[in-house]
């Protein structure tokens, strides 16, 4: 990495830490730390939701999948775009209103306990456990992505790169909490968007235009340009089913809860969905352009950055497809711009890790420490419990990410399915069906989470190649409805709260 690139990169990192210190000054209680005091504007909420959602997957995982296997992998993007729109359209406003009605809930477990008037705390504890389990895997995916970035950019070993990326992200999340996370995500969302537009445009221009790019890709393998060629029905369903995950992602739902007003939802929805659709197009075109560029241009300089090329059946390929965006940043741009683009990749990674760490730490502070062990804990005490939890969870995630052969997409898909199947149906039912009960929600959540683990880890082949979120989501929905209908009806107080939220 050149000096100019390195300086640009360092300036970006210092800027993110500066935001963390500024937010530290404004964080005095747990509501500030985990929800920013419900004062996010629509632009910040939309871009921080998008940035925390997409993570390194958008700049590393998806371009890498398209680069390696062609447009057949683009079905994931289609499913995600539909899911994100439906989430903003139907869940965002309703959740913002209901969390305020439900005793001003500040976390997802807090909302579920207050929504169902669960004095036993079991719903809060089980949902917090689900958050801690799957966010540890999700966070480790970000650690892997960060390690790949630092490894390719600085010539570090994988382990050294892993620790450096982790330390940077932990620092500002530890300090500033939700405000630091949201403000940095806003900046990072803009940076990611600019990078995903600029990189494929410059690459396609260098190749000779769109037609030349498509011809080059088709000459390598014609099926790379066909979304259905060699892609079975189960694979399409599995890819589209990623959209189901949106309804249960705590780090996205918490952005809805933090909006300053329900009236901000339409503007936030427009900004967020537009950002996402254009970003997905950019990622897909980056993967296609990478395949064409690396086989039609001189890319020998990549070896200087620790990026290895291999020969597969006469086709020159990157040894790690998930480094295609990194490769473009090095060969196409001035060192200063390259530094900004590498910062965009780190933005994508950091913006998701910080959100995940924050939700996990709030689960420990609010949903375990305060609810079970220290009901009289002071606000300052809870903030520091949250900060310590950030560091602890991050260290566990680093341990899980130690394998350099881990792929970002695999780790993300497991955690995404876990949240979507465990929380998605329960969030939807709790917002729109007054007949759901505490026992129905609890049974559905457990069945959804267990199904994902069993399906992913123990069932393989045939119909079991279906993405685990599909059976998990469906079984959760069925169990929650059946158990709710079979047991006692919700109390008058629960019905009254539901109707109040409906009127607002």
Image (cartoon, rainbow, N blue to C red):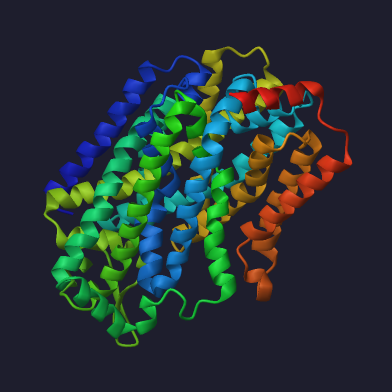
* Residue 227, quarter of picture: bottom left
Q: Where is 288 relative to 112, above or below?
A: below
Foreground of the two, 158 or 41? 41
Q: Residue furthest bottom?
A: 313
Q: Is residue 83 left or right of residue 175?
A: right
Residue sitting at x 28%, y 42%: 190
| Quadrant in which the N terminus is drawn | bottom left
Q: How many marks?
A: 0
Residue 275: give x, y in percent of width and height: 34, 47
Residue 186: give x, y in percent of width and height: 33, 36
Foreground of the two, 326 or 289? 289
Q: Is residue 61 left or right of residue 294?
A: right
Residue 483: give x, y in percent of width and height: 83, 44
Q: Is residue 406 visible?
A: no
Residue 14: give x, y in percent of width and height: 25, 33
Residue sitting at x 61%, y 40%: 131
Residue sitting at x 43%, y 35%: 266
Q: Is residue 86 visible?
A: yes
């Amino acid at each position: 990495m050149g000096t100019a690139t390195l300086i640009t990169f360092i300036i970006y990192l210092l800027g993110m830490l500066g935001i963390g210190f500024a937010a530290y000054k404004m964080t005095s209680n747990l509501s500030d730390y985990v929800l920013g005091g419900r004062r996010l504007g629509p632009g910040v909420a939309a871009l921080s939701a998008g940035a925390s959602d997409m993570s390194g997957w958008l700049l590393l995982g998806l371009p890498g999948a398209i680069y390696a296997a062609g447009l057949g992998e683009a079905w994931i993007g289609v499913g995600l775009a539909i899911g994100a729109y439906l989430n903003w359209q139907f869940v965002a406003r309703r959740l913002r209103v209901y969390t305020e009605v439900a005793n001003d809930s500040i976390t997802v477990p807090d909302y579920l306990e207050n929504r169902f008037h669960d004095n036993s705390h079991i719903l809060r504890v089980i949902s917090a456990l689900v958050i801690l389990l799957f966010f540890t895997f999700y966070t480790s995916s970000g650690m892997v992505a960060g390690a790949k970035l630092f490894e390719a950019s600085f010539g570090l070993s994988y382990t050294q790169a892993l620790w450096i990326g982790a330390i940077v992200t932990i620092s500002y999340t530890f300090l500033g909490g939700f405000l630091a996370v949201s403000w940095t995500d806003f900046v990072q969302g803009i940076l990611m968007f600019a990078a995903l537009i600029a990189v494929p445009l410059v690459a396609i221009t260098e190749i000779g235009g769109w037609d030349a790019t498509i011809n080059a890709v088709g000459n390598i393998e014609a099926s790379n340009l066909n979304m259905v060629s060699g892609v079975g029905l189960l694979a399409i369903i599995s890819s589209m089913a990623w959209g189901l995950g949106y309804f249960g992602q705590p780090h996205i739902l918490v952005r809805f809860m933090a909006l300053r007003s329900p009236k901000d939802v339409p503007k936030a929805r427009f900004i967020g969905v537009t950002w996402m659709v254009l970003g997905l197009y950019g990622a897909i075109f980056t993967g296609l352009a990478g395949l064409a560029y690396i086989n039609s241009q001189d890319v020998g300089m990549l070896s200087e950055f620790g990026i290895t090329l291999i020969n597969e059946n006469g086709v020159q390929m990157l040894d790690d497809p998930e480094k295609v965006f990194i490769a473009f940043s090095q060969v196409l741009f001035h060192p200063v711009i390259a530094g900004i683009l590498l910062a965009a990749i780190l933005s994508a990674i950091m913006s998701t890790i910080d959100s995940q760490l924050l939700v996990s730490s709030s689960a420990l502070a609010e949903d375990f420490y305060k609810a079970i062990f220290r009901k009289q804990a002071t606000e300052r005490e809870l903030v520091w419990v949250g900060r310590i939890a950030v560091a602890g969870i991050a260290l566990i995630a680093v341990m899980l990410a130690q394998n350099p052969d881990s792929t970002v997409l695999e780790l993300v898909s497991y955690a995404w399915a876990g949240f979507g199947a465990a929380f998605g149906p329960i969030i939807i039912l709790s917002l729109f069906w007054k007949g759901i009960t505490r026992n129905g929600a609890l049974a559905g959540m457990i069945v959804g989470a267990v199904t994902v683990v069993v399906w992913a880890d123990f069932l393989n082949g045939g119909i079991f190649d279906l993405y685990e979120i599909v059976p998990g989501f469906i079984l959760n929905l069925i169990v929650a409805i059946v158990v709710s209908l079979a047991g006692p009806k919700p109390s008058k107080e629960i019905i009254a709260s539901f109707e109040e939220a409906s009127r607002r």
